[in-house]
Amino acid sequence: MEILTSCNLASIAPYTPEDTNPWDIQKAKHVYRRLHYGATDATLNIAVLESPSELIDTLIQEAIGTPAPPQPEWGFWNFNDYTNYNEQNNAQINEWYNQTSLEFINGNLKNRLAFFWLNHFVTQLETYFYAPYLYQYWDLMHTHALGNFKDFVSAVGTSSAMLLFLNGFENTNNSPNENYARELFELFTLGLNNGYTQTDIEETSRALTGYNHFGDGVTGNPIIFDASTFDNSNKVIFEQEGPWNYDDVITILFEQKAALIAPFICEKLYNYFVSPDTNQEIVNAMATTFLANDFEIVPVLEQLFKSEHFFDLDASGLIIKSPYDLTTTFLRETGFQYNNTENQFSSFIVYLNEITGQNIFQPVDVAGWQRNRDWINSSTLAGRWEGIKILLWNHWNVDQEQFRDFAINLSGDSNDPAFITQSIIDFLMSRPLHTATDYDNATSIFRWEIPDNYYDDGLWNLGWDSAPYQVLLLLFHIIRMPEFQLK
């Protein structure tokens, strides 16, 4: 598979459509693939009626106004609430996996950003393996996804899932643990070896002591601060001396290192939403906006998403879809219906994404998934092909007619197999195929066993009984194309 290198030289200035650079379905599709998980043709036709800037405003405001997922009955249970802990806890975890997979299928920018931050502020479920903490952490990602980054960092460090994952629960005045202090600087705010020393880590770990006990002393309640285990002596952090505590650490960090934090976070956002190849000029402009708005996330997103740089079509087809991108985008763009009786379909989505490299609540390590080329190897590629094929059979068994409708909607009910084939391919791909031969080969698949004269004489059309199956065969072919893996 050819992975394109970014040739995008467009600026951070707002995109203004022109005759030579029009606002069209292709650009709207790019917006939805990067900000959502794709959109149907009907949604895109409505989207282009707005200006590019208006569409971005709509999607961001929609995300801001989206409430967090409903709190499950067990969302704040402690151990005393369980009658059979192992059985109930496992069932609750499975319930939340299924809930989350459906959130992606039906969600918007807020879901995508929550997942982005989940891979930034990494925890691993296997470390704490407690359903209420799993829910609480995912809720935290939603709550702060488009908020203030400084507040976000502050909230993450005292969350029960993070305190258990990075051993903050064990960090006391008698036995300081450096794990969270190290990752706070290295992974969450500054970057590797960027503006801090080993002494800063050691002193910070002492300031982060005290979060060692469950509320009311009951296991499973949120972990809270205990003054008796806090180190109240002076510490020196970034050359600032005092009896610093957790809140002081956050204040000092953002006061002293703001100019390092902003580009580090903006580069991550750029790599995720635009290209794995960093354009430092664009990142610097984003960082300036981040600083000017006191680490509010939305102004940075607005600047990036409305820019010439983001709308330049050289930005499309550069990123390998993650497993969740692959499955969810395909479901969203086709609009095909599925049968989720007893959560069988959502459970399969969870399973498929896990075997192809993305267990949503179990990133590979504390640094998270590195994305892009890491998603593809000989094993995961075959799994991606077969997984989408199984999804297609599920849709086929639910309603074969939706395959016919899909082709009719995209081709305007054409009876030209070459045009129908190209319409479907171009809709599902970020860029046109490389050669005419690629389209010809796909058209041959679509024509199936129908005699040539039926096409040549205009006798065949999408109303034929065979048409849904022909569309299915074409989709089987498309999902194995290298270009299908890109967005």
Image (cartoon, grey):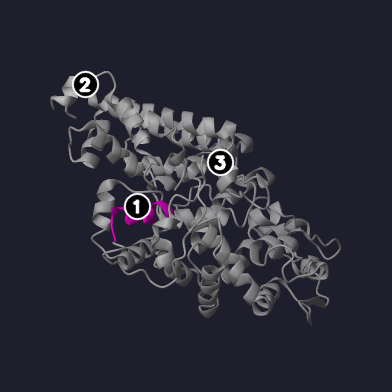
The residue sitting at 13% across, 25% down in the picture is 457
Q: Which residue is mark 3?
A: 93
Q: Of tags 3 and 1, which is closer to the observer?
A: 1
Q: Residue 274 has which mark?
A: none
User: Which of the two residues, 209 or 184, is positioned nearer the viewer here?
Assistant: 184
The residue sitting at 17% across, 22% down in the picture is 454
Asked if the stretch drawn in magenta spans residue 33, the answer is: yes
User: Which of the two residues, 357 or 250, is positioned nearer the viewer here?
Assistant: 357
Disc 2 from disc 3: Cα separation: 54 Å
Q: Earlier in the sequence, mark 1 or mark 2?
A: 1
- Toward the right, the furthest residue is 174
Q: Which quadrant of the figure has residue 291? A: bottom right
Question: What stretch of residues is rendered in magenta?
Answer: 23-34
Q: Which quadrant of the figure has residue 376? A: top right
Q: Which residue is mark 2?
A: 452
Disc 1 from disc 2: Cα separation: 34 Å
Tell me: 223 left or right of 352. right
Amino acid found under the numbered disc labelled 2: Asp
Amino acid found under the numbered disc labelled 1: Lys
Q: Which residue is mark 1?
A: 29
Residue 89 lies, in percent from the top left, at 59, 40
Looking at the rendered structure, the secondary structure element under dot 3 is helix
User: Which of the two residues, 205 or 310, is positioned nearer the viewer here?
Assistant: 310
